[in-house]
Image: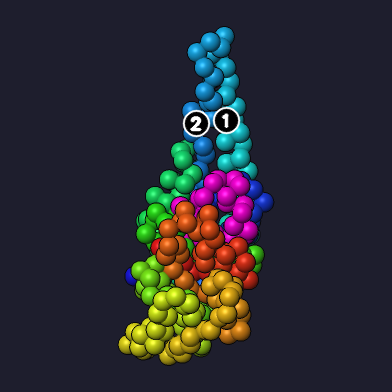
Amino acid sequence: MQIRRLLVPLVGSDNDQLVLDVGFGLARDLSAHVDALFVRPDPEDAVPYLGMDVGNLEEIRDEYRKHAEVIGKKTAAKSRRRFNAACKKQGIAKAKRPSEPSEISARWIDVVGSTTREMAEAARFCDISVFAGPPTDYHRLFPNVLECTLLESGRPLLFVPDSAVKFPPERVAIAWDASIPAVRAVGAAGTFLRDAKDIQVLSIEEQYEDTADPQKVVEYLAWHGLNAEGRVIPRAHEEVGHALLAAAQKTEASLLIMGGYAHNRFEEAVFGGTTLHVMRHTPVPLLMMH
């Protein structure tokens, strides 16, 4: 299916403006709808364990709940004002139901719960989720929300490091390692590939196992009327992520498509891995799927 519904996560920080700009810009290019989701933490989760011997235990717990609720509502209101201002400035209509296919629309959604769980749940019913700005912001504000959305939604995720994505991208690089996430990423990328003037399928040379054959992807894309070129990128002792980004930059790609967390996420977090390296250092937007 074509992309008609985008999820844009808002967190009440200055980064919201960038995410809205990227999301609205892409939605305008695709004539799509944007769901702007803000998740307020459950006040009950703010209550710490205080033990059984603390005096006025319930009063103290109530204070924590009230404080968390006030902060949550205040931050949500700030984020909603920014959303309303962006809609007004860009002339975007607000809608809760599907509009005409050629119209762009947006909706504000405010829920209470676990940010990681609610974002992943909402993303399952959108065609793509859009994150923007430094990936560390999502770890700092809401631990692993970007990664959890990628891992648990079953949907593609677009990550834009610091600027609006160019659509349609003229030059696209596909990171191919023959993993299931890479297969899914290629399958989900049709909207971004159909008008590309140059598509490069990049396989990074493996040191201790067979290197994935990029020509299989080239052949697959040809059946969809897409011309691509496959290349095996040699590497000495550098990490796969570093070699991949260097190769993508040489192709002047404005979009990199790749599978996310083909290996265990814990292993990547402890020992380092391609997904983390690319997300932290990419100069171009990433289209990822797990």
- The residue under label 2 is 45
Q: Which one is nearer the viewer's eye here, 40 or 259?
A: 259
* Image position of 123 with respect to 193: above or below: above
| Position of residue 134 in the picture relative to residue 230 (left or right) | right
- Quarter of the figure with residue 278: bottom right
The residue sitting at 47% across, 56% down in the picture is: 267
Mark 2 residue element: helix
Q: Measured from the top left, where is residue 8 in percent x and y?
A: 51, 56
Q: Residue 220: horizontal and vertical position, in percent? A: 34, 84
Q: Can residue 86 be seen in this view?
A: no
For image coordinates 57% across by 17% down, the residue present is 60
Residue in view at x 55 percent, y 76 percent: 244
Q: What residue type is labelled 2?
A: Asp
Label 1 sits on what residue type? Ala
In space, the residues marked 1 and 2 are separated at their CA atoms by: 9 Å
The magenta region covers 128-148
Number of disc labels: 2
Name the secondary structure under disc 1.
helix
**Pointer 2 local density, CA inside 10 Å: few below 14, some 14–19, many at least 20:** few
Q: Residue 68 carries which label?
A: 1
Say whether residue 181 is visible. yes
